[in-house]
Image (cartoon, rainbow, N blue to C red):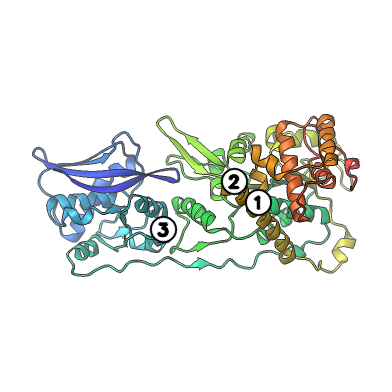
């Protein structure tokens, strides 16, 4: 009977159970690894051979066949080295087979027999816990894997250390979770002078998780405002921390097992490809939109991104996940993000108004802004003009209100949304107003007659799409939450319509806003 060791294969952020089997047969002396592995898996036999030689252990003079079952599941990565080596040692009688029965094993071998760190230790530990098993992983991944909770973890530095543990000669100490990193002091909103309307829009976007676009000339403070969004967002909840950390673990971005409750803020350069944004490559790694899961994806110079890369974000922004399709496999990564973007009104930067106005306006302005497709713009809830900062604004002292005060209002609004979602039995991922839909949206957005009449009038005159109607309603709900108003009133709908007035569908002008 072949020796078996349990390991895993990664499919996106999910882990699939795999059995590493070893059998020694008569015939030509060889070492083969089968089971639909990639190049790194095929090379594992040489790393195992070298690790055994580094320990002074000779391979048996027989035909060695290693099978990774199920054989029709694609397998990628170097973490199969350790389970193959342990199954071989069990077949050779170096360690008892029953010692490995209760463990999932992952790890890369070096030629001296030491075990190198891998990506994905945290999702591997969570998978092992779901199987009711422990985890054997590299020492450098032990602190990260320990975050999985109630799961027995062995984190040896080398194969020799693991053999000694099983023989009772030097028992390994269970690793402890790494530290929760305290984020540095975030950039403060009181450093931004003037721009009261964009600041208001930033607060609304933070409170409800809405997508936001700043449009203005160079130097008006668009990027400066966006970079201060993390300072007013609440920290990650325990559930969000685990979700986000699993993705970062898959990307190999967790060092020393240290996690942070600060929300991700990813800001890729505009030269980023579609695969860089949504994920892909030979091993379908998570892209920027997944690395920003439960946080912010900031796209500066929005029209400078390739149209294909931008349009690839349309589905993730709507569904909250991204699927990377391959000929023989489909890989899914979570991608529930808040999109914040910034752009100039035209290529010269100043548009058709004010000092330095473009001489080719409005054609240059239209051509430049048309680089962003209408369907993507339809998914942006707030489109805010950011005018140049005047000399008078710059001469004023710093504002008294900063990120601390705005963050307190954002936290209060989010607590209202969380309590409402719990009362209505909504899923945690649909607790924010920006993700509410269907019957849940109708339940959280009771409109009075005046508000309903205004929204209906706006939909008819501005030719709002169904998505535009829904997103306007969500935005109005957030504005009401910031005022701690149970009902969505006419003024809340009017303000929401003003923030969407730059829609490609047609505009409702600011004259619609009449306080009730």
Q: Which residue is mark 3?
A: 148
Distance (Cα) linking label 2 and label 3: 26 Å
Q: Which residue is mark 2?
A: 426
Q: Residue 481, percent across and down?
A: 74, 53
In terms of sequence position, does the residue under pointer 3 or pointer 1 come before the other?
A: 3
Residue 53 appears in view: yes
Distance (Cα) linking label 1 and label 2: 8 Å
Q: Residue 418, percent across and down?
A: 63, 53
Nearer to us in this view, 118 or 499: 499
Foreground mark, 3 or 1?
Answer: 1
Q: Is residue 382 left or right of residue 313?
A: right
In terms of sequence position, does the residue under pointer 1 or pointer 2 come before the other?
A: 1
The residue carrying pointer 1 sits among few (fewer than 14), some (14 to 19) or many (20 or more) residues within 10 Å by Cα, namely: some
The residue carrying pointer 2 sits among few (fewer than 14), some (14 to 19) or many (20 or more) residues within 10 Å by Cα, namely: some
Q: Which residue is mark 1?
A: 420
Labels 1 and 2 touching (C-beta < 8 A) = yes
Q: On the image, which quarter does residue 314 sit in?
A: top right
The residue at the point 54 percent across, 50 percent down is 291
Q: Secondary structure at mark 1?
A: helix
How many numbered tags mark residues here? 3
């Amino acid at each position: 009977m072949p020796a078996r060791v349990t390991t895993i294969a990664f499919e996106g952020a999910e882990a699939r159970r795999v059995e590493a089997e070893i059998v020694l047969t008569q015939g030509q002396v060889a070492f083969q690894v089968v089971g639909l592995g990639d190049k790194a898996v095929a090379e594992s036999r040489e790393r195992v051979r070298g690790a055994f030689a580094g320990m002074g252990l000779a391979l048996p003079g027989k035909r060695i066949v290693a099978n990774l079952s199920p054989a029709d599941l694609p397998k990628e990565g170097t973490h199969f080295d350790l389970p193959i080596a342990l199954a071989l040692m069990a077949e050779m009688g170096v360690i008892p087979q029953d010692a490995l029965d209760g463990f999932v094993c992952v790890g890369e071998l070096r030629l001296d027999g030491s075990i190198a760190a891998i990506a994905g230790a945290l999702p591997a530990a969570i998978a092992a816990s779901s199987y009711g098993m422990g985890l054997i992983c590299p020492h450098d991944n032990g602190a990260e894997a320990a975050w999985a909770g109630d799961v027995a973890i062995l984190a040896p530095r080398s194969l020799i250390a693991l053999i000694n543990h099983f023989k009772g000669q030097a028992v390994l100490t269970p690793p402890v979770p790494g530290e929760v990193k305290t984020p540095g002091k975030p950039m403060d909103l009181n450093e931004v002078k003037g721009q009261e309307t964009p600041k208001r829009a930033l607060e609304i976007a933070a409170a409800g998780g809405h997508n936001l676009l700043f449009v203005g000339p160079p130097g008006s403070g668009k990027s400066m405002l966006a970079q201060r969004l993390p300072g007013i967002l609440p920290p990650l909840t325990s559930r969000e921390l685990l979700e986000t950390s699993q993705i970062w673990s898959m990307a190999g971005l967790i060092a020393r097992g240290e996690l942070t409750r600060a929300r991700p803020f990813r800001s890729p350069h505009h030269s980023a490809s579609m695969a860089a944004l949504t994920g892909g490559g030979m091993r379908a790694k998570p892209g920027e939109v997944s690395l920003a899961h439960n946080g912010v994806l900031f796209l500066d110079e929005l029209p400078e991104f390739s149209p294909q890369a931008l349009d690839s974000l349309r589905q993730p922004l709507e569904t909250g996940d991204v699927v990377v399709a391959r000929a023989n496999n489909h890989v899914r990564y979570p991608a529930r993000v808040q999109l914040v973007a910034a752009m100039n009104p035209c290529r010269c930067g100043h548009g058709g108004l004010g000092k330095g106005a473009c001489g080719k306006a409005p054609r240059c302005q239209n051509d430049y802004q048309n680089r962003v497709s209408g369907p993507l713009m339809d998914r942006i809830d707030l489109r805010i003009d950011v005018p140049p900062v005047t000399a008078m604004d710059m001469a004023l002292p710093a504002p008294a209100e900063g990120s601390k005060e705005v963050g307190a209002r954002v936290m209060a609004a989010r607590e209202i949304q969380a309590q409402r979602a719990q009362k209505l039995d909504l899923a945690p991922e649909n607790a924010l107003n920006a993700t509410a839909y269907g019957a849940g949206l109708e339940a959280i957005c009771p409109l009075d007659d005046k508000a309903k009449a205004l929204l209906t009038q706006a939909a008819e005159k501005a030719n709002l799409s169904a998505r535009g109607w829904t997103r306007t309603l969500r935005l109005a709900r957030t504005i009401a939450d910031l005022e701690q108003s149970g009902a969505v009133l006419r003024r809340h709908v009017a303000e929401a319509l003003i923030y969407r007035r730059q829609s490609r569908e047609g505009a409702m002008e600011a004259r619609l806003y009449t306080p009730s």
